[in-house]
Image: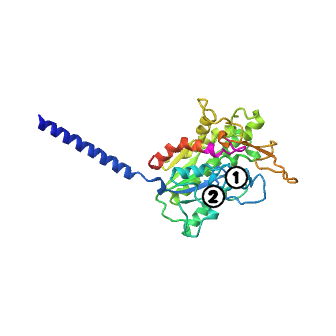
Amino acid sequence: MKSLFFVICILVLLHAAGHAESSRRHRDDRRQASSYKLFVFGDTFVDNGNTDKQALTWWSRNWYKPYGVSDANHDNSPTGRFSDGKVQSDFLAMILGHDESPATENVRRDDDDDSFGMNFASGFSKAKAINTTTSEFSAQIGRFRRLLKHGIISRDLNQSVALVAFSGYDYTYIPHKDTDRHGYTNFIDDVTESIANGVSDIKELGVTKVLVNMLQPMGCSPRFTRTANNYTECIKSEITDIHNKKIKEKLGSEDSVLLLDLYTTFNQIIHPKSGTGFVHRHLPCCESNEAGGYCGQVDSWNGEELFQVCDKPDKYFYWDEYHPTQAGWRAVMDKLEDSIKEFLDIDS
């Protein structure tokens, strides 16, 4: 009887050891987050300073106070980000084990150092070309291609991921001929086709995984709710619905692409099931005095500030009329983190 008990114990120990070894091998097979190189393409949602610093205007406000007011890592000063602090690309970089987004293309440290990637996103970029032969998205990819060609970015992209983030600036101007439903449906198809083609180009250059933003609920942004209902509720955006449907059709079945569902994620935060979360989910922290103004605007004659800034940005989901606060982006990326890590096969 004792010998039988001894045999059973040995079998149990061997099974446990085998299970532990299997688990160890599985952990070893998973990539370390910090091994990934990150390349960022898109617009203001992910731009970390690629736009030129010029005299204060609506286009260049990201270089002026109060932008950056919550960014303790940069002396609470503007860095060219369209937020009070970090933006989406920064939080993705943090998921990958870094402190913030990789450097902008124009401030890389030297001619043979791409650090852990590069950020090409710039301001109010569009995916589709309008009145030009090359879209801003294509131009960003073109710069990526040239840096690869000249060896400034290493051609070894076996562990690389790209973030493609366009938040709807293509739809701020729709040609008059496309303003009926049939016309703008075709226009949206062109925009989403441009995004899909860009993703294909990025993969052909060697990037192994691509994250693509779906459109956030544009009708929830203060830009629209201010005049529609004084920041009380979202308005319906058919453009958003059609865009996301077409993006799913074009990219949703690709194994090397993960669609980031900003539509659902933003809605979960703006309309939480419980009373927890942000105190202010429609009202922006930084609000212009006039509907046609902008956060950071000053009177050109006397320098008077023509905007109001809240005391606690972390209580607000939106920073200005269009962009989330640093706290807002943190909440968004917290909800997306698990799916991103699973897609990239990195340790939680």
Within the image, what quadrant is residue 129 found in? Answer: bottom right
Q: Residue at x 85, y 51 (%)?
A: 299
Label 1's element? loop
- Residue at the top extreme, as displayed: 274
Q: Residue 240: where, in percent of width, then height? A: 65, 40
Is residue 235 positioned above or below 255 on the image? Answer: above
Label 2's element? helix
Is residue 320 positioned above or below 198 on the image? Answer: above
Is residue 147 positioned above or below 292 on the image? Answer: below
The residue at which mark 1 appears reads as 124
- Left/right placement of residue 36 relative to residue 192 reads left
Is residue 48 positioned above or below 171 on the image? Answer: below
Residue 138 is marked as: 2
Q: Identify which residue, 71 or 131, lies in the foreground.
A: 71
Instruction: Please tell me whether residue 345 belongs to the stretch shown in magenta.
Output: no
Residue contact between numbered discs 1 and 2, judged by CB atoms under 8 Å:
no
Say few, some or many: other residues with alpha carbon within 10 Å of mark 1 (under 14 / 14 to 19 / 20 or more).
some
Q: Residue 130: where, in percent of width, then height? A: 71, 54
Q: Which one is earlier in the sequence, the residue at label 1 or at label 2?
A: 1
Q: Residue at x 77, y 46 (%)?
A: 176
Span colored in magenta: 318-329
Q: Residue 261: where, in percent of width, then height? A: 57, 41
Q: Residue at x 64, y 64 (%)?
A: 106
Instruction: Identify the main secondary structure in magenta.
Output: loop
Say few, some or many: other residues with alpha carbon within 10 Å of mark 2 (under 14 / 14 to 19 / 20 or more).
many
Q: Amino acid at mark 1?
A: Phe
Q: Amino acid at mark 2?
A: Ser
| Coloring basis for residues | rainbow
- Left/right placement of residue 174 relative to residue 164 reads right
Q: Nearer the viewer, mark 1 or mark 2?
A: 1
Residue 307 is marked as: none
The Cα atoms of the two marked residues, 1 and 2, are separated by 14 Å
